[in-house]
Image (cartoon, helix red, strand yellow):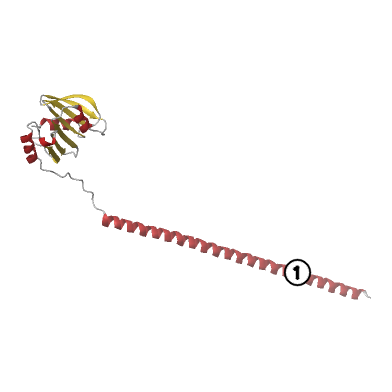
């Protein structure tokens, strides 16, 4: 074979190899572009899914907040409609003067406030007549500071009557009221309660309550 024929054959082979190489590169570029498109598509899908999740979460939180606002509004409305200012409980007054007069007719030693301290209200009264020995007289009073003062009297002078009315007590000195000496007592079985005790002439007189010694002494001073 001549050299010219050999050169032509070599050129053809080289051209064919170049064509194959070009095709391979083209295929590689096509595959690379396909991979890039797939990656872009995957990223786009992931973004859309994340967006949908975030949107659902946002809607859920928004719905919860909206529902909470509605509930609070309803509660506020109900409170506004149903709330009423709490009225301070007022003592129920009782008429005691007529019963005091009747008691004095039966037992001259019965005492009552003359006059009743300003703003104080009698809330309970009871007299046990001589036929119901022992004779007892009770008058319960609420002060202007909503504290309680009770007057207890009886023709029983023993410790049993005092224990019945006061429970366990401890001595707390004395108090002079209108020239009369009363025994001060701390009531051990009742919180923040004290008593004034006067025993004499066959009569026991007790002034007790949670109003404090000054109020008890003020009440004792108007007993007639």
Q: Is residue 24 left or right of residue 41?
A: right
Residue 103 location, quadrant: top left
Q: Residue at x 72, y 70 (%)?
A: 27
The residue identified by callout 1 is 24
Quarter assignment of residue 164: top left
Q: Residue at x 50, y 61 (%)?
A: 54
* Residue 100: x %, y % from top left: 8, 38
Figure quadrant of the C terminus: top left
Question: Is 172 or 33 nearer to us in this picture?
Answer: 172
**Secondary structure state at the residue bearing disc 1:** helix
Residue 220 in view in this figure: yes
Q: Quadrant of residue 212?
A: top left
Q: Residue 48 in the image: state x and y as whole percent.
A: 54, 65
Residue situated furthest front in the rendering? 131
Query: Is 10 situated left or right of 138 in this image?
Result: right
Residue at image location 70% in from the left, 68% down from the top: 31
> Which residue does the image show at 75% across and 69% down from the upper left?
24
Q: Is residue 173 above or below residue 207?
A: above
Q: Residue furthest right?
A: 1
């Amino acid at each position: 074979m001549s050299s010219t024929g050999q050169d032509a054959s070599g050129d053809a082979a080289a051209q064919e190899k170049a064509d194959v190489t070009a095709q391979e590169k083209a295929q590689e570029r096509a595959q690379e572009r396909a991979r890039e498109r797939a990656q872009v598509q995957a990223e786009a899908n992931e973004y859309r899914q994340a967006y949908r999740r975030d949107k659902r979460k946002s809607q859920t939180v928004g719905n919860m907040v909206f529902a909470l606002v509605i509930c609070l509004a309803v509660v506020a409305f109900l409170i506004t409609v149903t709330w009423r200012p709490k009225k301070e409980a007022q003592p129920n007054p009782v008429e005691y003067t007529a019963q005091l007069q009747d008691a004095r007719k039966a037992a001259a030693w019965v005492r009552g406030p003359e006059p009743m301290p300003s703003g104080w209200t009698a809330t309970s009264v009871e007299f046990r007549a001589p036929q119901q020995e022992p004779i007892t007289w009770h008058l319960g009073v609420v002060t202007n500071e909503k504290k309680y003062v009770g007057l207890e009297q009886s023709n029983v002078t023993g410790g049993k009557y005092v224990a019945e009315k006061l429970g366990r007590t401890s001595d707390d000195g004395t108090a002079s009221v209108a020239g009369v000496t009363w025994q001060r007592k701390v009531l051990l079985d009742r919180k923040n309660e004290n008593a004034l005790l006067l025993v004499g002439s066959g009569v026991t007189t007790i002034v007790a309550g949670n109003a404090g010694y000054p109020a008890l002494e003020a009440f004792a001073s108007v007993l007639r």
